[in-house]
Amino acid sequence: MVLYFCFRIMQPFLMPIFLALILSTLLAPVYGLLLKKLNGRQSLAALLICLGLTAAILVPVLFLSISLANEATDAYQQLKDPETLRKIESWLDPTNNPVLRRVTLWLPGSLRLDNLRLACSIS
């Protein structure tokens, strides 16, 4: 029982520990090479490894964030188009969509899709 609670305490830290173990194993040869090139300056070699690892993590995250923001902007612009809103509203109309027709039968009387006005909520 005590071992289980010890494991539960350590569980949030296990993934970062294993990630650090893998990264240190993979970057040890690069550190050794940098150490030789920098004439044994351990602190400078460690700093360069840390900066390189930080850049290797942050640059893709930055590009992904920029791409995600662009996609969100494009989706918002497309949703603002009245033609797109008409298509979505026609798809959400239970008389045109057989799946929604079945869903409305399951819904309680207080929840009706007939009162859904998507264009008013987006604009």
Image (cartoon, grey):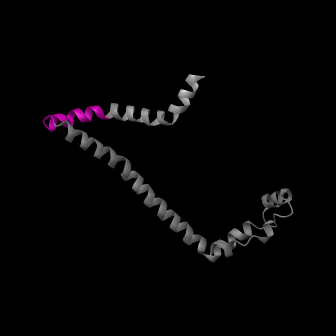
Q: Residue at x 82, y 67 (%)?
A: 95
Left or right of 47 in this view: 67: right
Give 38 or 43, whichever is nearer the viewer: 43
Give the dominant element type of the magenta stretch: helix, strand or loop. helix
Q: Name the spot of residue 49 as percent of width and height, x first.
A: 27, 41
Residue 21 in the image: above or below residue 82: above
Image label count = 0
Give 103 or 10, whichever is nearer the viewer: 10
Q: Quadrant of residue 102?
A: bottom right
Q: Which residues are magenta?
A: 27-40
Give 29 or 94, whichever is nearer the viewer: 29
Q: Residue at x 40, y 56 (%)?
A: 62
Residue 61 in magenta stretch: no
Left or right of 34 in this view: 62: right
Q: Name the spot of residue 18 as percent of width and height, x first.
A: 43, 32
Residue 96 in the image: above or below residue 18: below
Residue farthest toward the front in the current orientation of the protein: 2
Residue 79 in the image: above or below residue 41: below
Give 67 or 99, whichever is nearer the viewer: 67
Q: Which quadrant holds the C terminus?
A: bottom right
Q: Name the spot of residue 99 as percent of width and height, x first.
A: 78, 58
Q: Which quadrant holds the N terminus?
A: top right
Q: Name the spot of residue 108 as percent of width and height, x first.
A: 85, 59
Q: Residue at x 75, y 70 (%)?
A: 116
